[in-house]
Image (cartoon, rainbow, N blue to C red):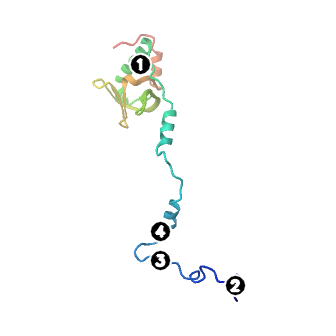
Amino acid sequence: MKDPNGPHRYDDIIHLPHPTSTRHPRMSPQDRAAQFSPFAALTGYDAVVSEVGRLTETRIHLDDSAKEELDRKLLFLQQRLLELPQITVTYFRPDDRKAGGAYVDLTGRLKKIDSQFGCLIFQDGTLIPVEDVIRLEGALFQALEQETVPFSE
């Protein structure tokens, strides 16, 4: 049957198979879709914004009585290292990217107190600088708190 509008411009090629290159393989549908994915003109912008918005804490400076209490507990721990006491340490961990840091609690078995380098060494290999410690807790310290006589070396 003849078209009432007459011959069309592409009638001669409309039913031909799609041409396929012998030099270039067909692109996968995923690669074709990637061509049309959103374009991020400012790469890394979102990461910078979230980093600036991330909050850090400032380091707490202990008063003399709190330092004395920590020293007392450290000496107590030093005398009981063979027991591998389980303690919880609250310490300041400086932030790698900006000023400040975060206070972190770590519970574990204390292996050694290295007085040369000033750090606590736990059984799992964790090292905590003594200068960053603000609190030591554990069942072991109940005996220390019950002592009526001041603890001395």
The image shows residue 34 at horizontal and vertical percentages of: 51, 60
Label 1, residues with CA under 10 Å away: few <14, some 14-19, many ≥20: some
Q: Give the amino acid at mark 2.
A: Asp
- Cβ–Cβ under 8 Å for marks 3 and 2: no
Q: Is residue 4 above or below residue 86?
A: below
Looking at the image, which is closer to me, 57 or 13?
13
Q: Which residue is mark 1?
A: 70
Q: Residue at x 41, y 10 (%)?
A: 150
In the picture, the disc for residue 3 is: 2
Q: Give the amino acid at mark 3.
A: Thr
Question: Regarding mark 2 in the picture, which secondary structure is present there?
Answer: loop
In the picture, the disc for residue 20 is: 3
- Cβ–Cβ under 8 Å for marks 4 and 3: no
- Cβ–Cβ under 8 Å for marks 2 and 1: no
Q: Residue at x 53, y 62 (%)?
A: 33
Front tag of 3 and 2: 2
Residue at the left extreme, as displayed: 116
Of mark 1 and mark 3, the one earlier in the sequence is 3
Find the distance from the CA under tag 4 to the CA under tag 3: 11 Å
Looking at the image, which is closer to me, 48 or 146?
48
The image shows residue 9 at horizontal and vertical percentages of: 60, 79
Front tag of 4 and 2: 2
Find the distance from the CA under tag 3 to the CA under tag 2: 30 Å
